[in-house]
Image: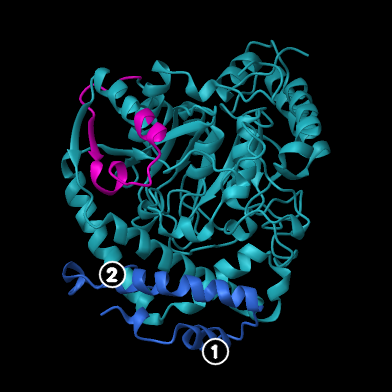
Amino acid sequence: MPELPLTIAEAGAALRGRRLSSTDLTKGFLERIERLNPQLGAFIVVTKAEALAAAASADADFAAGKDIGPLQGIPLGIKDILATKDAPTTANSKVLDPAWGDGWDAPVSERLRAAGAVILGKLVLSEFAIGMPDPDTGFPVPHNPWNLEHSASGSSSGTGIAVAAGLVLGGIGTDTGGSVRGPAAVNGHTGLKVTFGRVPKYGCAPLGYSLDSIGPMARSAADCADILQVIAGYDPRDPTAAQKPVPDYRAALSGAVTGLRIGVPKEYFFDSPHLDSEVKAAVLAGIEALRQAGANVTEVTVPHAALAKEANTITLLAEAFAYHHDDLASRWSDYGKFTRVTLGSGALYTAADYVQAQRFRSYFKQAVAKLMAGLDLLITPTSVLPAEKVSEIDLQKGMSRPSFTGIWNLIGLPALAVPCGFSSQMLPLSMQLIGRPFDEATLLRAGDAYQRLTDWHLRVPPIAAGRPA
Amino acid sequence: MDRSSSVDVETTVRVLLQAQGLEVSEAEFARFVQMYPLMREGADSLYIPEVRYEEPSPIFTPDWE
């Protein structure tokens, strides 16, 4: 077995050059999953037979000269909150009715298969995309591949781990307050939270109806572009799906950032006393690299950013509480201990709190639109800290820290988490690029340009044998 | 006004949870009581002058398509 490729682009070149078959590639990833998943807790279920059948089909297509695009024959994973026809959908919970996702594909799953992807299985998440890992629920407990004692973040923890440890070449996550970007950040790869409505979310168990998004996670921005190309676009089964044309994301990857207008909001983001000094230094160095490559960088202020975090929290918890109301009342102890308290806290808000959060949301959308009138993107840290030690996580302390991710869900903007260094403890660090609505292309172009200058996204944790860290 | 300091937090939290039919353990109740003032403070902080005349988002539409 040759060394497994690190990226979708690398694997695609090997497949098209006949240096590797999809079947051998898939077998290699299945072997790695078998070896590492017991320690890492990334997969809930591995669909081995279906994956090998899909790989054989991709090989037959290649042999017949049929090439349907960059995901043909590529092993991927799907967060276990999206319906897939060949495996149960659990949302990492005993509560979700198994009949809900039984025997059918969500549009995103459907589109990945139609693009020739090889789906290796369903990936671990925080229960219903919220809360903390809970060993008592019987589901695998996710571990950060860079240090097993540290958090893999959430809620798309399984996808974050699987990409970082090379158990898949890419995967699908969902993001309501940072659930794609957090795991991408702490596990050391790229993750794209798409514009609200860019990717149809039908067939995905909801968390916050007006905040949820489904996005790609992979080592590189270029790989995320290839996945987004396949999953983006209108589907009438999602009433919030946008009827907008899907641009050619791969074509946007010019490698150039000359003249790109970048805003750097110091207030709230870089001047926070909670911000880790190594995170701050790495993100500022990342911005400087883009400036030296030709971008124009200016300091800006995001008005009332701290309040946007509150409005996002209220919106998320109120919407999630409405969805879970009946089950929380009748099956409280079937939820994990962290999940039920977090979801139950939605009961403590009033109806007026929710409406006021929506009024703030209107204001904030206009304020950010005004701020970004002369900018292409903003850059902030993705999170205040590198991956925390699980035994030291303090939820109460976490509530009082700033959040750099959820505020963009509040106004539906796209945001890309990009690796930008390592801490002194060898934990990944990440910067966040925030774009204008439906302008994922510019984020991917900037992320890709940065990744042509650096190799942080290609570093592999020592636990994933085959290549040194 | 900081409402969290002028109400009986334990009573309020107990009533709100009971009103929704949530039966929680004493340890969980203590956690809710700990969280409530911060949540209340966050919700109250959204009443700023800039939002005074804003319409809420998202907006309901009566379209059938």
Q: How many residues crowd mark 2 within 10 Å: few (<14), some (14–19), many (20+)? A: many
- The quadrant in which residue A120 appears is top right
Residue found 72% across the figure and 73% down from its top: A333
Q: What's the mark number on residue B19?
A: 1
| Picture quarter with the N terminus of chain A | top right
Q: Which residue is mark 2?
A: B46
Q: Are marks 1 and 2 on the same chain?
A: yes
Chain letter, disc 2 residue: B
Q: What's the mark number on residue A167?
A: none
Q: Nearer the viewer, residue A420 or A83?
A: A420
The hue in which chain B appears in the rendered picture of the protein: blue
How far from the left and from the top, in percent, is residue B55?
24, 73
Q: How many residues crowd mark 1 within 10 Å: few (<14), some (14–19), many (20+)? A: few
How far from the left and from the top, in percent, is residue A417?
44, 37
Sequence order check, earlier mark of 1 and 2: 1
Residue B11 lies, with reference to residue A391, above or below; the image says: below
- Alpha carbon distance from label 1 to label 2: 25 Å
Q: Which residues are magenta?
A: A255-282
Residue B64 seen anywhere in this rendered image of the structure:
no
Left/right of residue B50 with respect to residue B28 in the rendered view: left
Marks 1 & 2, CB-CB < 8 Å contact: no
The hue in which chain A appears in the rendered picture of the protein: cyan
